[in-house]
Image: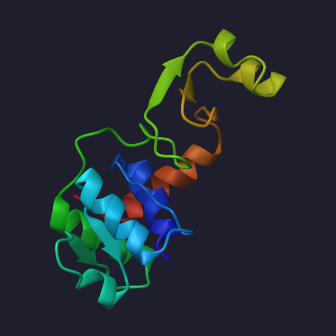
């Protein structure tokens, strides 16, 4: 229910696990075991004993992000330092390390690459980065 929020929290640098197939019981168990705060829009789940939770009030992404930042502050990790898909930290690598994973024109036009050791995705500052930065500015987090 908060998949979009999870993706943006990762892009902002928050350590954010997300599993939309897990049951409430499994989510609660994992949150306790890993010492995580469970973000949810489910009032019953948020009210469970022994869990640190944050009930997300809004359905609007921008308001959701602001609520998380108001409660927890900005993350200590840099923006775009985690994989948006699997949450693993990204590692800057040379072009040789990703030669087989990116299109040839990307190798010719880009200088910096980041590799996710968790899922193998490769990131670079392509044209999409402008849209990501605009959205981050729209969150108005300062």
Q: Give percent across and percent down for residue 68.
A: 26, 67
Residue 100 visible within the image: yes
Q: Is residue 14 left or right of residue 48?
A: right
- Quadrant where the C terminus sits is bottom left
Q: Which residue is drawn at the image coordinates 71% and 22% (left, top)? A: 109
Q: Is residue 114 left or right of residue 76?
A: right
The quadrant where residue 5 appears = bottom left
**Image location (x, y in percent) of residue 125:** 58, 34
The residue located at (23%, 73%) in the rendering is: 53
Q: Position of residue 105 (x, y in %)?
A: 81, 25
Q: Quadrant of residue 114?
A: top right
Q: Residue at x 42, y 55 (%)?
A: 17
According to the image, what is the colour scheme of the structure? rainbow
**110 vs 24, nearest the viewer:** 24
View extreme (right): residue: 104
In the image, is residue 52 above or below residue 102?
below
Numbered circles on residues, count? 0
Counting from the top left corner in percent of width and height, residue 28 is at: 33, 69
Q: Which residue is located at x 60 percent, y 32 percent?
A: 124
Asked if one can make out residue 57 in the rendered structure from this viewpoint, the answer is no
């Amino acid at each position: 229910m908060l998949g979009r929020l999870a993706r943006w929290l990762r892009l902002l640098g928050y350590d954010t696990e997300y599993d939309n197939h897990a049951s409430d019981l499994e989510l609660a168990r994992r949150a306790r075991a890993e010492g995580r705060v469970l973000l949810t829009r489910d009032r019953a789940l948020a009210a469970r004993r022994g869990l640190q939770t944050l009930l997300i009030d809004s359905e609007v992404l921008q308001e959701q992000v602001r609520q998380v930042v108001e409660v927890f502050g900005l993350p200590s990790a840099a923006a775009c330092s985690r994989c948006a898909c699997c949450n693993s930290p990204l590692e800057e690598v040379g072009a040789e390390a990703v030669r087989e994973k990116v299109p040839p024109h990307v190798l010719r036009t880009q200088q910096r690459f980041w590799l996710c050791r968790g899922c193998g995705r490769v990131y670079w500052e392509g044209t999409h980065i402008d849209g990501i930065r605009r959205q981050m500015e729209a969150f108005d987090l300062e």
